[in-house]
Image (cartoon, coloured by chain):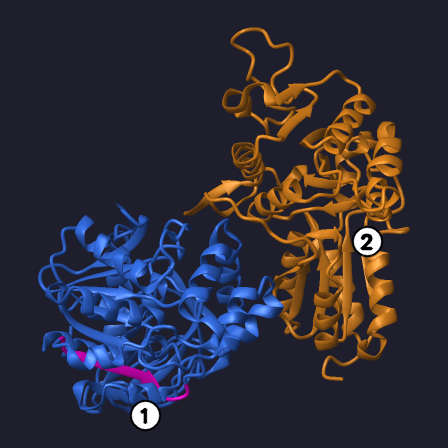
Chain colours: A orange, B blue
């Protein structure tokens, strides 16, 4: 039965249901149980933002607080996955991934390939991404392109509570390493979410709004900015189609190409920095494979090529806004819409 | 208030509908309309449909503006005879707005879905109306009780109407303990036992028709009449492209063309309808349930159970209704029971005839139930 719950609760519920279903699912990370573990406080925190709150009471020692050493516990999670467990490691902020790149890029991502398909590494690394949280340059990045670049990793970035639950369940059941990116500004956003378990297949983009004039492609928080832009554009007579990629690796090229073949115009919105971004990737793929359908040059709306500013005023300007997206759409429609 | 003035309001199609969008008027203001004439197209986040006239008269006011969203029960048009003065109609429209606002809270307290434990698992159902007789609506393969959203309120004029989700469907338990016609029929009698329903008129659509027929054959004392709509169980043919396609589809791209086969007008299949079915199909256990049922009921692209001869020999009153352009089960099956049943094939309707031609289907079913 569906009821409204938040993105954060949806993630908690996915972990709970999968731990109930499969005894090999374990969860580890910094402060995910409750810190020092004094009696009575054992379950107090449930992670820095309380995402895993309550799970220790239900599943006991299958959740483990780790030392403040990402390289150690991410390595441990990958090793456990290689030995038959299905660990979900919480890395807090994706920005901290740097200290465990060898384990992720050079080990987990390559086991299946180097061992001729005989090894599987069903590990999920959950981490917060994105700006807008006043958390400054080292806790606010959208580093999705870094991981999408690496063959052997799957990269997921849900935009709403329904998708967060179904995609996390799929991530846990998947036999490959998955980088699961949770936008911290979406934790409070609510959607209708079934109580039951369900898995959303990877590589299946969601058309969140239909339109015939322009295709706006995005993922994560900026899907909502794109929808706001589409609403504004509708008042000017421009019908925008909005596609939520949901997973960046694998990526659903078919849905993007089919949409652009209908609309003839493409705007890609990405909260990542612009160089070698998801936006650049999608724009290039469409230009190469649907050039004949394009009526205007594809437009990219991204963060600027700078670190995330600490100044709240600048940080708000940093994230692609609905106005910037609408302006990009207008660039693609500048030449007669009817053409 | 002038009783010769009749409102056209934003309909409520299903429990979750709170508002709808007027997409276009099929009749301009000033047109003479008869009962059942299609007047205005409405789209909800779930489905696109048509509002039909409940009264004859002249369409005096077209209030609902195209592409505008109105709450359920909002006045979107007015029907009255030509001799009703303009001033009376203006007064009626002005009065109506206040009237609707007062009734708003009451609508919120309306019935919700309910659940009941049965030997076949926990089943969800909706209940409308009260008193005798009992009517039970049984949806088809892959469907749920919302397939009856244009029918459940209308049929409640006859008595108490229950619409259930069969095991493996809607929000009922996803495990189908016995994937067969007998198993599903057992779920229906188990449902009746759990709610203390001694006997009922069964209305079945598609696979649900075969379930209803099986129940009538096994328990003639518990089934007062059968209304079989685009029903399975009356012949061997079935479009396996539909059933297999429905089971196999995991993406919107694959599912939409399959669903379009359900309707005479493929535009009925909205984005939300596809999304809702995808959400259902993703739930744990649904894939197994659908595969088990289609394997048992439609093996090799044929219906495994043809009950026509047994029904001819049975005493239960039978009404058969079909959509003329049904692409799932051929409309020719409407004649399978010969003179034994009342049969009507409705034009400009497909497999989901109870949605596409709801007024006519409701009229036929009500007359049949009332005997």
Q: Give coordinates of residue A125: x percent, y percent.
A: 72, 35
Asked whether residue A321 is in view, the answer is yes
Q: How many marks?
A: 2
What is the chain identity of the residue bearing mark 2? A
Q: Residue at x 72, y 83 (%)?
A: A338
Q: Residues within 10 Å of mark 2 (few under 14, many from 20)?
A: many
Q: Residue at x 47, y 79 (%)?
A: B239
Q: Give coordinates of residue B248: x percent, y percent.
A: 56, 65
Asked whether residue B67 is in view, the answer is no
Q: Give coordinates of residue B102: x percent, y percent.
A: 24, 56
Decide which of B22, B130 is in the foreground and name it: B130
Viewport quadrant of the N terminus of chain B: bottom left
Q: Residue at x 66, y 67 (%)?
A: A241
Q: Is residue A79 left or right of residue B291?
A: right
Q: Is residue B103 above or below residue B233?
A: above
> Is-magenta flag for residue B312?
no
Decide which of B62, A64 is in the foreground and name it: A64
Q: Closer to us: mark 2 or mark 1?
A: 2
Residue holding disc 2: A278
Q: Is residue A214 left or right of residue A75?
A: left
Regarding mark 2 in the picture, which secondary structure is present there? helix
Decide which of B73, B133 is in the foreground and name it: B133
Q: Are marks 2 and 1 on the same chain?
A: no
Q: Is residue A19 left or right of residue B185?
A: right
Specify the segment rendered in magenta: B316-325
The image quadrant of residue A98 is: top right
Residue holding disc 1: B31
The answer for how far apart the CA atoms under marks 2 and 1 are is 55 Å
Regarding mark 1 in the picture, which secondary structure is present there? loop
Decide which of B157, A18 is in the foreground and name it: A18
């Amino acid at each position: 039965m569906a009821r409204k719950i938040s993105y954060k609760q949806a993630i908690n519920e996915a972990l709970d249901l999968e731990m109930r279903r499969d005894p090999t699912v374990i969860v580890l990370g910094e402060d995910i149980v409750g810190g020092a573990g004094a009696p009575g406080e054992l379950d107090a925190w449930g992670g820095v933002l309380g995402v895993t709150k309550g799970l220790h009471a239900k599943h006991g020692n299958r959740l483990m607080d780790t030392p403040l050493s990402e390289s150690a516990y991410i390595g441990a999670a990958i090793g456990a996955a290689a030995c038959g467990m299905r660990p979900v490691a919480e890395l807090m902020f994706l920005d901290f991934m740097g200290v465990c790149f060898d384990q992720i890029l050079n080990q987990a991502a390559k086991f299946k390939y180097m061992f001729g398909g005989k090894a599987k590494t069903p590990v999920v690394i959950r981490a917060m991404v994105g700006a807008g949280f006043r958390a400054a340059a080292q806790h606010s990045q959208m580093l999705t392109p870094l991981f999408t670049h690496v063959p052997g990793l799957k990269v997921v970035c849900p935009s709403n509570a329904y998708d967060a639950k179904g995609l996390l369940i799929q991530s846990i059941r998947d036999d490959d390493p998955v980088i699961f990116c949770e936008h911290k500004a979406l934790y409070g956003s609510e959607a209708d979410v079934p109580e039951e378990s369900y898995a959303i297949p990877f590589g299946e983009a969601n058309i969140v709004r239909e339109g015939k004039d322009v295709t706006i492609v995005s993922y994560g928080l900026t899907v909502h900015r794109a929808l706001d832009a589409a609403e504004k554009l509708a008042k000017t007579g421009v019908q925008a189609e909005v596609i939520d990629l949901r997973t960046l690796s694998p990526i659903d090229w078919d849905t993007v190409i089919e949409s652009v073949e209908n609309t003839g115009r493409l705007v890609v919105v990405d909260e990542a920095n612009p160089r070698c971004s998801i936006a650049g990737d999608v724009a290039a793929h469409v230009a190469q494979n649907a050039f004949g359908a394009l009526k205007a040059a594809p437009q990219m709306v991204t963060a600027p090529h700078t670190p995330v500013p600490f100044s709240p005023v600048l940080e708000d300007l940093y994230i692609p806004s609905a106005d910037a997206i609408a302006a990009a759409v207008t660039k693609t429609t500048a030449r007669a819409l009817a053409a | 208030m002038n009783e010769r003035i009749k409102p056209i309001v934003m309909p409520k199609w299903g429990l979750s509908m709170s508002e709808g969008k007027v997409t276009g008027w099929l009749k301009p203001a000033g047109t003479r309309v008869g009962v059942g004439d299609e007047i205005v197209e409405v789209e909800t986040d779930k489905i696109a449909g048509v509002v039909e006239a409940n009264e004859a008269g002249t369409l005096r006011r077209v209030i609902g503006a195209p592409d505008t969203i109105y709450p359920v029960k909002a006045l979107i048009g007015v029907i009255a005879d030509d001799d009703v003065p303009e001033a009376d109609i203006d007064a009626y429209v002005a009065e109506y707005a206040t009237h609707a606002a007062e009734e708003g809270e009451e609508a919120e307290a309306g019935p919700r879905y309910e659940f009941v434990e049965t030997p076949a698992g926990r089943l969800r159902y909706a209940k409308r109306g009260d008193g005798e007789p009992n009517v039970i609506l049984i949806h088809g393969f892959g469907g749920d009780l919302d397939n009856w959203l244009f029918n459940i309120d209308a049929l409640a004029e006859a008595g108490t109407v229950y619409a259930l989700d069969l095991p493996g469907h809607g929000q009922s338990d996803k495990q189908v303990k016995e994937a067969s016609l007998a198993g599903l029929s057992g779920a229906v009698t188990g449902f009746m036992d759990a709610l203390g329903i001694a006997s009922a008129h069964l209305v079945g659509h598609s696979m649900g028709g075969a379930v209803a027929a099986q129940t009538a054959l096994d328990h003639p004392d518990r089934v007062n009449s059968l209304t079989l709509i685009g029903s399975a169980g009356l012949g061997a043919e079935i479009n396996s492209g539909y059933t297999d396609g429905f089971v196999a589809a995991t993406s919107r791209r694959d599912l939409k063309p399959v669903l379009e086969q359900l309707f005479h007008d493929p535009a009925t299949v909205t984005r939300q309808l596809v999304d809702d079915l995808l959400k259902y199909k993703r739930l744990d256990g649904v894939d197994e349930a659908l595969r088990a049922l289609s394997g048992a009921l439609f093996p090799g692209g044929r219906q495994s159970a043809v009950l026509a001869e047994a029904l001819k020999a049975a005493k239960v009153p039978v009404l058969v209704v079909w959509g003329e352009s049904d692409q799932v089960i051929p409309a020719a099956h409407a004649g399978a029971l010969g003179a034994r049943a009342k049969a009507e094939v409705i034009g400009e309707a497909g497999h989901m005839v109870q949605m596409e031609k709801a007024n006519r289907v409701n009229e036929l079913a009500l007359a049949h139930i009332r005997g």
